């Protein structure tokens, strides 16, 4: 496998995602999130997505109304970051504020990019999203969701 994956790595091999349990001469064993043990013949592995080798980036989208003051959102996000960042051992660098961008459903989202240790990016995104939404709501800012019936790509 030329060092592309090691036991314990979080990987995606074709349609299979999970944690590598065994790398053998002929097969690789990967345990999926639901506990399924997958035996993959090495000759069938054409693309390896190793999610354990580099810091991983997650995007936190905060859907807001178009008339919401972006400066207020930025102040709230910075305040939340000041509270969370010092105690979050999974972050590999400070969150990066991207700002307002169009959403997939036609509204606006205020984006923040968080970079975390491999395998922790989903949990980090969830922690920061929860804290941002709570702080925005406490400030009286409505956090929107996609309109009912909207099909996302």
Image: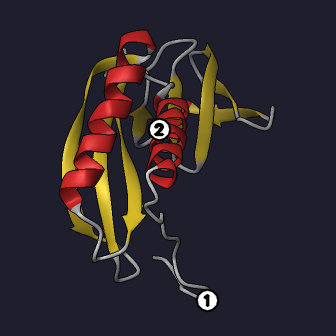
Numbered badge on residue 149: 1
Residue at point 49%, 70% (across, down): 144
Q: Residues within 10 Å of mark 2 (few under 14, many from 20)?
A: many
Secondary structure beneath disc 1? loop
State which quadrant residue 114 falls in.
Answer: top left
Q: Quadrant of the C terminus?
A: bottom left
Give the mark nearer the N terminus: 1 vs 2: 2
Residue 35 in sight from this viewpoint:
yes
Above or below, 47 against 146 in this view is: above
Q: Nearer the viewer, residue 128 or 27?
A: 128
In this rendering, position of residue 35 left or right of residue 66: right
Is residue 133 positioned above or below 28 on the image? below
Residue located at (21% from left, 59% from top)? 70
Q: Which residue is mark 2?
A: 125
Instruction: State the image coordinates of residue 94 (x, y, percent, origin top left).
Output: 25, 24
Residue, x 47% and y 43% (percent of image)? 135
In the foreground, 8 or 43 = 8
Q: Is residue 1 above or below residue 132?
A: above
Question: Helix, strand or loop at disc 2?
Answer: helix
Q: Name the image quarter holding residue 117.
A: top left
Tell me if label 1 and label 2 are in contact, CB under 8 Å: no
Badge 1 local density, few (<14 within 10 Å), some, or many (20+)?
Answer: few
Q: Residue at x 50, y 38 (%)?
A: 131
Task: Please identify the quadrant where the N terminus is shown.
Answer: top left
Colouring mode (rainbow / by chain / secondary structure / one colour) = secondary structure
Marks 1 and 2 sit apart, C-alpha to C-alpha, by 25 Å
């Amino acid at each position: 496998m030329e060092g592309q994956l090691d036991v314990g790595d979080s990987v995606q091999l074709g349609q299979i995602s999970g944690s590598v349990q065994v790398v053998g001469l002929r097969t690789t064993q990967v345990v999926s999130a639901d506990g399924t043990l997958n035996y993959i013949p090495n000759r069938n592995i054409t693309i390896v997505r190793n999610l354990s080798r580099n810091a991983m980036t997650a995007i936190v989208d905060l859907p807001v109304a178009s008339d919401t003051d972006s400066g207020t959102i930025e102040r709230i996000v910075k305040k939340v970051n000041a509270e969370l960042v010092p105690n979050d051992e999974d972050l590999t660098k400070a969150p990066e504020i991207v700002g307002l961008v169009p959403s997939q459903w036609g509204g606006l989202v205020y984006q923040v990019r968080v970079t975390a240790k491999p395998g922790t990016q989903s949990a980090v995104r969830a922690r920061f999203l929860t804290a941002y939404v709570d702080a925005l709501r406490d400030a009286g800012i409505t956090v929107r969701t996609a309109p009912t019936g909207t099909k996302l790509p």
